[in-house]
Amino acid sequence: MTAGRGQDGLLTPDHVLHRAAERLAHQFAGMVNAETVERVVFESYTALARTASVTTHLPTVTEKFSRDRLSALAQSRGLIAKPVPEILYVCVQNSGRSQMAAAITRHVAGDRVHVRSAGSQPGTAILPGVIEVLAEAGIDVGEEFPKPLTDDVVRAADAVVTMGCGDACPFYPGKRYLDWQLEDPAELDLDGLRAVRDSIRSRVEDLLAELAPAAAAQ
């Protein structure tokens, strides 16, 4: 049997993850050492696997998530410049409110801010109703997925917006913290979801007016 392949001839997850770690170590050479890269990749895989409903593409999703975590780590160390403000949205499952806020922010601000979202107890997928009401506003979240909250993305953020996750988010001095009181989308019908979507958009525009005035004016 070829090394790195299972009995069915497919590459094993460990082999795929090691290859992903090699690619990322090359990308972040001089900023993050190879051992840290590998640790982040395997930690990310384990965290995502806890809630993944479909594991077929999990190694690919893991590489994407790990790349973002490593970018955040390098930013927090001052090794990658932050040309625009960084906003982190956090809710419990990262399947409703924080995904809506992140998607709306990207839609309104474009590349004038950088946005991340995470969950203190991430769910398995974005709520179908959330996908539907965002699509009504011309916003596609088809490639997004719930992500666990990690220390590195908090450190990299300029503003951290929490939504119903209590004290799960670590606190660092010098950052802007806000808590938005919004109903849980999991308990709402489509009309309720539309109301939350519109409330989030208004709050996002206010936040952008402070962090990135040019973005809010678009």
Image (spheres, helix red, strand yellow):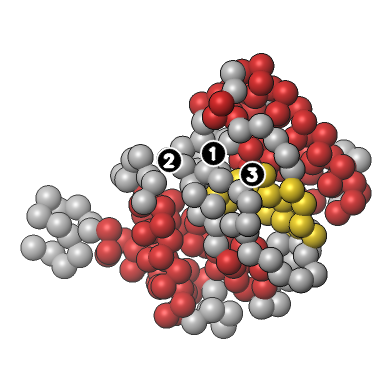
Question: Would you say the residues marked 1 and 3 are in contact, meaning their CB atoms lie under 8 Å apart?
Answer: no
Measured Cα–Cα span from mark 3 to mark 2: 18 Å
For label 1, the crowd category at 10 Å Cα-Cα, with few meaning under 14, some 14 to 19 and many 20 or more, is: many
Of residues 187 and 32, the one nearer the viewer is 187
- Residue 124 has which mark? 2
Of residues 141 and 205, the one nearer the viewer is 205
Question: Which residue matches tag 3?
Answer: 164
Q: Position of residue 198 (x, y in %)?
A: 76, 27
For label 3, the crowd category at 10 Å Cα-Cα, with few meaning under 14, some 14 to 19 and many 20 or more, is: some
State the quadrant of the N terminus. bottom left
For label 2, the crowd category at 10 Å Cα-Cα, with few meaning under 14, some 14 to 19 and many 20 or more, is: some
Given the image, on which type of amino acid does mark 2 rest? Thr
Question: Would you say the residues marked 1 and 2 are in contact, meaning their CB atoms lie under 8 Å apart?
Answer: yes
Given the image, on which type of amino acid does mark 1 rest? Ser
Q: Position of residue 204 (x, y in %)?
A: 79, 41
Which residue is drawn at the image coordinates 63% and 64% (left, top)? 170
The mark that comes first in sequence, 1 or 2, is 1
Question: Would you say the residues marked 3 and 2 are in contact, meaning their CB atoms lie under 8 Å apart?
Answer: no
Vertical arrangement, residue 138 with respect to residue 76, above or below: above
Given the image, on which type of amino acid does mark 3 rest? Gly
Q: In the image, which is nearer the foreground, mark 1 or mark 3?
A: 3
> Mark 3: which secondary structure?
loop
Question: Which residue matches tag 1?
Answer: 95
Q: Position of residue 193 (x, y in %)?
A: 65, 24
Of residues 82 and 150, the one nearer the viewer is 150
Vertical arrangement, residue 191 with respect to residue 11, above or below: above
**Tag count in the figure?**
3
Measured Cα–Cα span from mark 1 to mark 3: 13 Å
